[in-house]
Image: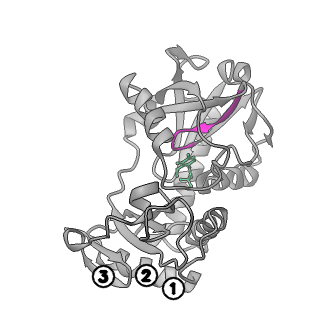
């Protein structure tokens, strides 16, 4: 039974209770983060906490904790978790109140931290790549906020499950936004491309790591809008997220991406990502 943190208490998950009037439950009025933990070191903690702050700003909810307090609370859950490699899920909601869309007069946020089992991508996914489908992006216009209100993402992700695929890539007005739970990169003419950060996508922590590694590796890259036609005729397509790391997409809507095998730039980036991760785990690079 995992040990969790809830509003000032460390307790077994089965004993954690929230009031049914919590606005997270009633309205999905909250934000969250998922942080991978390797050898009990939270990966890119500073970036995750910075994104949490901007999500909280986006929903006009004060941050209940300083970064130092978050680090301490997360550390307490990580120390009690069963395995060395895991994830941490944290969620802040606008707390309980009358069922009224308007904010309560007095807000007491609910803070919840849960250890997650982190399963690294299966070796055959890395070797063979994954299949994805596309769908029109029907989410709201603040996809940069990591909101717990995930119903559109849930429905979009289920489309790919129903199709036996790993992810749903989202197209808005003829351009690639991101995946239902990942960011997307494309390779064309040897150039690594990704949509620039905007309100139409979540600013992924892994997206930033991949761009940093591209810079370090001297891989030519550019951030610019990617049209649907450019996605469909790409030499390589990748998806990235904290849990998927970097994966090659080899089938898109039932069609092979180029020759249907993970491409050379993917192999380079995947190796660089694994190297970087292991270096961070050994503590040789400042983990920020
Ligand atoms: N976009 C969406 C919609 C996501 O849910 C995620 C996963 N949190 C990502 C992108 C990737 O973000 P990260 O690399 O920080 O996990």
Instruction: Please name the residue that numbered disc 2 is placed on.
Output: 73
Residue 176 highlighted magenta (yes or no): yes
Give the Cα separation between the discs numbered 3 and 1: 14 Å
Q: Residue at x 54, y 16 (%)?
A: 256
Residue 158 in the image: above or below residue 80:
above
Q: Pick the residue in front: 252 or 285.
A: 252
Q: Residue at x 75, y 25 (%)?
A: 227
Instruction: Please name the residue that numbered disc 3 is placed on.
Output: 10
Give coordinates of residue 61: x percent, y percent. Answer: 59, 71
Mark 3 and mark 1 residues within 8 Å of each other at the beta carbon: no
The image quadrant where one finds the N terminus is bottom left
Counting residues from the start of the chain, the first of labels 3 and 1 encountered is 3
The magenta span reads: 175-182
Instruction: Please name the residue that numbered disc 1 is placed on.
Output: 69
Give coordinates of residue 208: x percent, y percent. Answer: 67, 55
User: Assess mark 1: CB under 8 A from ligand 1?
Assistant: no
Density class for disc 3 (Cα within 10 Å; few <14, some 14-19, many ≥20) is some
Density class for disc 1 (Cα within 10 Å; few <14, some 14-19, many ≥20) is few
Q: Quadrant of residue 126?
A: top left
Give coordinates of residue 205: x percent, y percent. Answer: 61, 57
Q: Is residue 195 left or right of residue 145?
A: right
């Amino acid at each position: 039974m995992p040990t969790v943190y809830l509003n000032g208490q460390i307790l077994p998950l089965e004993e954690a209770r929230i009031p049914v009037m919590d606005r997270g439950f009633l309205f999905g009025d909250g934000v969250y983060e998922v942080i991978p933990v390797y050898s009990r070191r939270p990966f890119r903690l500073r970036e995750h906490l910075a994104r949490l702050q901007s999500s909280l700003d986006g929903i006009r909810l004060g941050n209940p904790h300083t970064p130092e307090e978050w680090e301490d609370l997360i550390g307490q859950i990580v120390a009690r978790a069963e395995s060395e490699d895991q994830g941490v899920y944290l969620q802040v909601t606008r707390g309980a109140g009358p069922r009224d869309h308007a904010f309560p007069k007095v807000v007491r946020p609910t803070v919840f931290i849960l250890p997650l089992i982190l399963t690294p991508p299966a070796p055959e996914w890395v070797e063979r790549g994954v299949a994805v489908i596309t769908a029109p992006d029907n989410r709201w216009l603040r996809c940069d906020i990591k909101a717990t209100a995930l119903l559109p993402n849930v429905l979009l992700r289920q489309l790919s499950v129903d199709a036996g695929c790993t992810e749903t890539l989202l197209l808005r007005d003829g351009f690639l936004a991101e995946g239902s739970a990942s960011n997307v990169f494309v390779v064309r003419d040897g150039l690594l491309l990704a949509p620039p950060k905007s309100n139409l996508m979540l600013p992924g922590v892994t997206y930033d790591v991949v761009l940093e590694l591209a810079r370090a590796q001297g891989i030519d890259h550019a951030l610019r809008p990617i049209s649907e036609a450019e996605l469909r005729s790409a030499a390589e397509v990748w998806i990235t997220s904290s849990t998927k790391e970097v994966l090659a997409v080899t089938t898109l809507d039932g069609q092979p991406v180029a020759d249907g095998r993970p491409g050379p730039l993917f192999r380079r980036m995947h190796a660089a990502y694994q190297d970087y991760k292991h270096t961070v785990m050994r503590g040789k690079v400042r983990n920020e």
